[in-house]
Amino acid sequence: MRKPAILVVDDTPLNLKVLEGILSESYRVRLAASGAEALETAAESPPELVLLDVSMPGIDGFEVCRRLKAAPRTRAVPVIFVTALGEVEDERRGFEAGGLDYIVKPVRAPLVLARVRTHLALADQNRELERKVEERTAELNATRLEIIRRLGRAAEYKDNETGLHVLRMSFYSRAIALAAGCCAELADTLLQAAPMHDIGKIGVPDRILLKPGKLDDEEWKLMRRHPQIGAGIIGRHASPLLEMARLVALTHHEKWDGSGYPRALRGEDIPLVGRIVAIADVFDALTTERPYKKAWPVEEALALVRRERGAHFDPALVDAFLGVLPEILEIRRRYAEEPPQEAVRSATAGRL
């Protein structure tokens, strides 16, 4: 069985020898005769616990403890001060520095072993708790993402039955975001939020969604409510993912020139994620065969995107989209759908 590693730090050789004798039967003991040596040793190979003298020349024990707690690799390592100091002020400084306990010199073997066992056991329990929390959090995140994907698919099936649309346009959105200089975290969150862009269509009556032919003005008013319905379905949340999904649902039909809906936002008043999804959504809708229209050739869809640069779409994001066009086309190829076998309804391309 592997023995836990204990780092003992003291500038007095006799104290090091005493503590090594107490601990060596049950633990792997490493010794450091100064604060600087202790920090170097801990950085190279973090121990399971540190027994740390306070009064040392150069870097004293309080400063060593602070630096250990500031470093990511040693932040969680328990520190027990071993010192002849016994004043309340010294104890306060030690706890403020991040120490967990004190052992007063001259040390007694039973007390040292008991304190070490206790704090190693507590550290093990904390690590196990953190592992379980991380595992549970991962499960909850996976469940939440699956629900988001399923709701996105539900909206697509209600409208046009293009099940892979949400997958393609989500990957397009991520590629555009990265090309525009967004960080990987934001781009990955957008990948997961984008499938909810049309969730509001659940609230649009079927007589409008499934109407053969052109919508009249009153029907268009109802159709154009779906971004607000979608934002309402998602609601406001502290979760960055759900908040981004709400913004995407609400703003993906806004246009750079202010002619979009539902709020006629203009330019950078439109949230960045809404501007990104607008391009991804339209490009995929144009290039996909649906029951009510043929797929546009890629060249024609690209020509429209270029024409709408500065009108429908953010000019900088159009440039980003075109800059990663090979990746966009690879996503389109990878997640291509089989052509629909029969038309479920007829409609106009103006509903994109």
Image: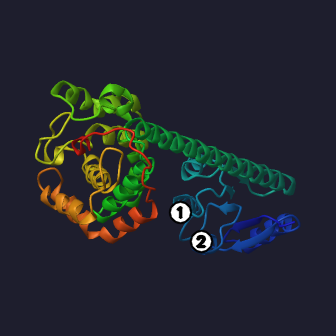
Can you tell which mark lies on residue 43?
A: 2
Q: Amino acid at mark 1?
A: Ala
Q: Quadrant of the C terminus?
A: top left
Q: Quadrant of residue 40?
A: bottom right
The percent coordinates of residue 264 (x first, y second) are: 15, 37
Q: Which mark is residue 71?
A: 1
Horizontal side, residue 109 vs residue 7: left or right:
right
Which residue shows up at 53% across the image and 71% down it? 58
Q: In screen coordinates, is 214 left or right of 71?
A: left
Q: Nearer the viewer, residue 93 or 221?
A: 221
Residue 18 in the image: above or below residue 310: below
What residue type is disc 2 on?
A: Ala
Please provide percent x and percent y for residue 351. 25, 40
- Could one spot residue 195 in this view of the protein? yes
Callout 2 environment at 10 Å: few (<14), some (14 to 19), or many (20+)? some
In the image, what residue occupies the spot 29% across and 48% down? 293
